[in-house]
Image: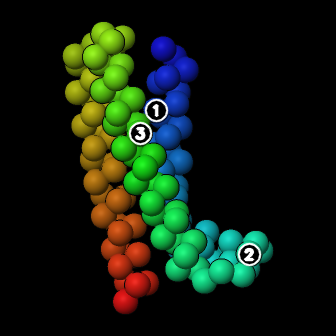
Amino acid sequence: MIKTKAAILSSVILASLLGIFGQEMAYYFNEYFFRKPPLFYLTLLTIISLFLYITSILLTFILYMKREILNVDFWTYFSLIGVIALFISCWSIFVLAMWWG
């Protein structure tokens, strides 16, 4: 159970970092890896960030259904992940939309 909680926490942290610093990472990947347009990398990083948020919400729900976390802990996890995911995902989608023009 502790490994699952650590996976949820690391997933949220990684998704947050990808969502906030995706633009800088896209430029970095373009410069030091394959010469693809940074828009390609930013789109990929945004999709990965959204996928990680969805995965962490699903893992939290699965833990709750298996009765490995309490009702209070479930709502705490769910609301914190939801608020963090909402704001950072909106930001990363806004940045992606501005790049797409």
Relative vertical location of residue 34 with respect to residue 83 in this rendering, above or below: below
Left or right relative to 33: residue 63: left
Left or right relative to 57: residue 18: right
Measure the alpha-carbon separation of dots 2 and 1. 31 Å
Which coloring applies here? rainbow
**Circle 2: residue type:** Phe
Return the mark for residue 8: 1
**Residue 51 or 75: which is nearer the viewer?**
51
Measure the alpha-carbon separation of dots 1 and 3. 8 Å
Q: Percent from the top left, x then y, of residue 32?
A: 77, 74
For the point 39% across and 67% down, which residue is it? 92
Q: Is residue 99 visible?
A: yes
Return the mark for residue 55: 3
Reading the chain from its start, which is encountered first: label 1 or label 3?
A: 1
Q: Secondary structure at mark 3?
A: helix
Q: Nearer the viewer, mark 1 or mark 3?
A: 3
Reading the chain from its start, which is encountered first: label 3 or label 2?
A: 2
Q: Mark 3 and mark 1 in contact (Cβ < 8 Å)?
A: no
